[in-house]
Amino acid sequence: MAVHSERVQTQSPESGKAAVATIETSAARGDGAGTAKKKSARPADGRSLGSRFAPYLLLLPATVATLGLLGWPLLKTVLVSFQNLNARQLVQHLTEWNGFENYTEQLKDEQFWAVTGRSVAFTVLNVFLIMVGGALVGLLLNRLGKKMRLLLSIGLLFAWAMPVVASTTVYTWLFETRFGVVNWLLDSLGWHSMAAYNWTGSQYSTFFVILLLLVWGSIPFVAFNMYAALTTIPKELYEAARMDGAGSVKIFTAVMFPNLKPFFLATTFLEVIWIFKAFTQIYAIKAGGPDGLTRTLPIHAFLEGSGRQHYGTGAAIAVLTILILGVLMAYYFRIILKQEDEL
C-alpha cells in the first residue's frame, strides 16, 4: 500500500504578525498620504480663503463711510490751513498757498495761547465735576429700590436725550436777567442784590452757567455707565469685605474701584474729548463773550474763520486744536492701552 505525502506549508505566528504589521503600516502610509493631500488643499491655518476675508468685507462699508464723512473733511481742513483763503480768494476761486504762515501767526499770538490755557482749565474742571457727580448718581442708582431707580433713570434719560439747543435755550431762560427763575428764587430767599443780576455780564458768571449746563447734560451718561459697571461686581466680594469689617469707604476703595478702573478710564477719556470740543452750548449762550473771555479753541476757530472770513486761519486753529487734544490725551491713551493688556 502506497502512502502519499503532501507538503504542507505552515506559517509561524511571528511571521503572521509581521505581515499584519506590514499591511497596517502600508495602509497607514496610504491614509497619511491621502490626508496630507487633503490638508495641502487648505491654508495652513485650516480656514478657507473666504472665511479669512469675510471680517474685512463686513467692515468695508463702515470704513468707507468713516473715511468719506470724517477723513475727507479733515483732509480738506488741513489743505485749507496751508492757504491764504479770505473773502476775495473765495469769490474769485483763487488758491493761494502760504505754507506754514497761518500756523506761525497763531503760535506767536498771545490770544491763541490764552484761549488754549482757558480751554484746558475749563475741560479739567468740567470733567472732574462730571465724573464725581456721575459716579455719585451711579452709586445712588445701585442702592435704590426698583421703583425709585426707575423714576430716577427716567429723569436722567430725559436730561440726556434733550437736544443741546433746547437745553441751552432753557438755561438761557433760567438765568435771564429780568425774568429768570434763578434771579427770582434768589431774591425770594433774601439775596435782593441778585434780583436783576446779569449772569452773562462777566467771565466767571458766564462760565458758571456754561459749566452747569455741560455738567447737567453729561452726568446721565456717566451715571448709567457707573450703574452698569457696578452690576458686574459679584456680591460675594461685598459680603467678604463686610465680614472682614470693612466700612463703606474701604469697600469702595478695595472692592469697587479696582473693578471699576476700566470704566473710569474709558469714560474720562470720552468726557475729555466731548468737553474739549464743546461748541453749541458756549456759542449759544454768549458766543464766546463777554469781550471774548469765554472763548475756547472751537469757538476761537469758528470766529476767526467764518466770523472774520479768514478761513485759512480758522482751519489752522482747528488743526492745532486736534493736535493739542492729541498731545493732552497721549499719556492717558497709553494708560488705557496698558489697562487693556492687563485684562
Image: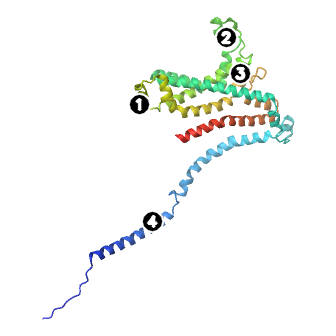
| Earlier sequence position, callout 2 versus callout 4 | 4
For this rendering, which residue is in front, 326 or 61? 326
Q: Would you say 59 lies left or right of 308 here?
A: left
**Residues at marks 3 and 4 touching, judged by CB atoms closer than 8 Å:** no
- Amino acid at dot 2: Asn
Query: Does label 1 or label 4 sit earlier along the sequence?
Result: 4
Q: For mark 3, does the 10 Å Cα neighbourhood hold few (<14), some (14 to 19), or many (20 or more) residues? A: some
Q: Which residue is pictured at 71% across the width and 43% down the height?
A: 72
Q: CA distance from mark 1 to mark 4?
A: 52 Å
The residue beneath circle 4 is 35
In the image, what residue type sits under mark 4?
Thr
Kindly identify which numbered label has been placed on residue 236.
Answer: 1
Crowd band around label 1 with a 10 angstrom C-alpha radius: few (<14), some (14–19), many (20+): few
**CA distance for labels 1 and 3:** 49 Å
Give 7 or 251, whichever is nearer the viewer.
251
Quarter of the rendering occupied by the N terminus: bottom left
Is there a contact, CB below 8 Å, between mark 1 and mark 4? no
Q: Is residue 82 above or below residue 39?
A: above
Query: Residue at 87% of width from left, 36% of height from top?
Result: 88
Q: Quadrant of residue 126?
A: top right
In front here: 22 or 322? 22
Q: 10 Å neighbourhood of mark 4: few (<14), some, or many (≥20)?
A: few
**Badge 3 is on which residue?**
285
Q: Which residue is mark 2?
A: 183
Where residue 338 is drawn, which disc sits there? none
Element assignment for label 3: helix
Q: Nearer the viewer, mark 1 or mark 3?
A: 1
Amino acid type shown at disc 3 = Ile
